[in-house]
């Protein structure tokens, strides 16, 4: 449901108190300092943090006997038709979240010139090989820091609920540096040659396991 929560946070916030967001922003009275500001959900658009986030095509992993959550979610989230995957590259920042399983989009995002914001629930083979804030931007699983992080990189040019004006330039250069570090790592590690070597070693081990002499076989380099 993390993906549904992200769509709700960016498209469906209301004035209800449970939609109030806590965002780290410059203090209008002292821009050199920062403070957490409580902002009602329906006032978030006043910050001009524009996003383009939606659930595509249909809701997966829903429904059941006597349940109507598929229809309820479809009505709530206003589904959109699929788009060309290449359309992602027109955006500076890309959100990647695990769903019912791991996300298959993260590595292509990492290979692009865009900056991936990642929320992960499942472990991946590369977890110990990449570093948060060096190769990608981590977002907590509850998405509590989502707006603060987006505000830091994208900047804020809008007003707060009390009428105070905030003009905070985005940290674009810092974002570009992280994006390029991630891209450099991906280009070194995700080569076709690496995949061939891995697959060859996998076949060797599979051959050993299926051989009746599996306890005796070994491969000496």
Image (spheres, rainbow, N blue to C red):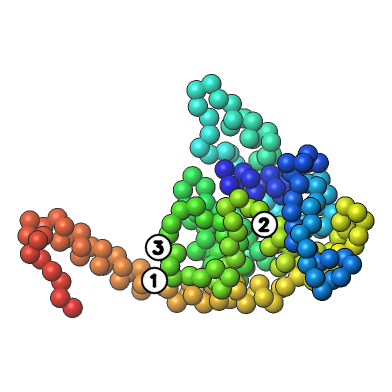
Give how far across and how far down residue 115 sits, in percent.
62, 67
175 relative to 132 in the view: left or right: right
Depth check, mark 2 against mark 3: the one in front is 2
Give how far across and how far down residue 152 sits, in percent.
72, 67
90 or 182, which is in the foreground? 182
Residue carrying label 3: 125
Depth check, mark 1 against mark 3: the one in front is 3
Q: What residue occupies the far right of the structure in this picture?
A: 163
Element assignment for label 2: helix
Taking the spot 70% from the left edge, 53% from the top edge, the residue there is: 52
206 relative to 155 in the view: left or right: left
Residue carrying label 2: 146
Residue carrying label 1: 192
Rendering quarter of residue 176 = bottom right
Which callout, 2 or 1, points at the residue further toward the start of the chain? 2
Element assignment for label 3: loop
**Residue 90 seen by the camera:** no
Which callout, 1 or 3, points at the residue further toward the start of the chain? 3
Rendering quarter of residue 188 = bottom left
Cα distance between the residues tagged 2 and 1: 34 Å
Q: Which mark is residue 98?
A: none
Give how far across and how far down residue 69 sits, in percent.
59, 30
Quadrant where the C terminus lies? bottom left
**Residue 84 seen by the camera:** yes
Cα distance between the residues tagged 1 and 3: 17 Å
Element assignment for label 1: helix
Taking the spot 91% from the left edge, 54% from the top edge, the residue there is: 162
Taking the spot 82% from the left edge, 57% from the top edge, the residue there is: 47
């Amino acid at each position: 449901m993390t993906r549904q929560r992200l769509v709700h946070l960016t498209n469906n916030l209301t004035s209800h108190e449970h939609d109030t967001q806590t965002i780290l922003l410059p203090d209008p009275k002292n821009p050199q300092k920062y403070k957490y500001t409580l902002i009602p959900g329906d006032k978030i658009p006043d910050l001009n943090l524009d996003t383009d986030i939606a659930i595509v095509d249909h809701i997966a992993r829903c429904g059941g006997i006597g349940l109507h959550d598929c229809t309820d979610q479809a009505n709530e989230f206003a589904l959109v038709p699929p788009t060309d995957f290449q359309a992602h590259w027109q955006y500076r920042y890309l959100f990647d979240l695990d769903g019912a399983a791991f996300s298959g989009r993260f590595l292509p995002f990492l290979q692009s010139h865009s900056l991936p914001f990642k929320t992960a629930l499942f472990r991946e083979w590369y977890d110990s090989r990449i570093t948060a804030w060096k190769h990608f931007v981590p977002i907590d699983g509850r998405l509590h820091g989502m707006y603060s992080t987006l505000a830091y990189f994208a900047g804020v040019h809008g007003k707060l609920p009390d009428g105070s004006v905030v003009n905070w330039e985005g940290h674009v250069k810092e974002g570009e540096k992280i994006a390029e570090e991630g891209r450099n790592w991906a280009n070194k590690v995700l080569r076709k040659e690496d995949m061939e070597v891995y697959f060859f070693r996998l076949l060797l081990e599979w051959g050993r396991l299926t051989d009746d002499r599996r306890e005796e076989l070994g491969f000496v380099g």
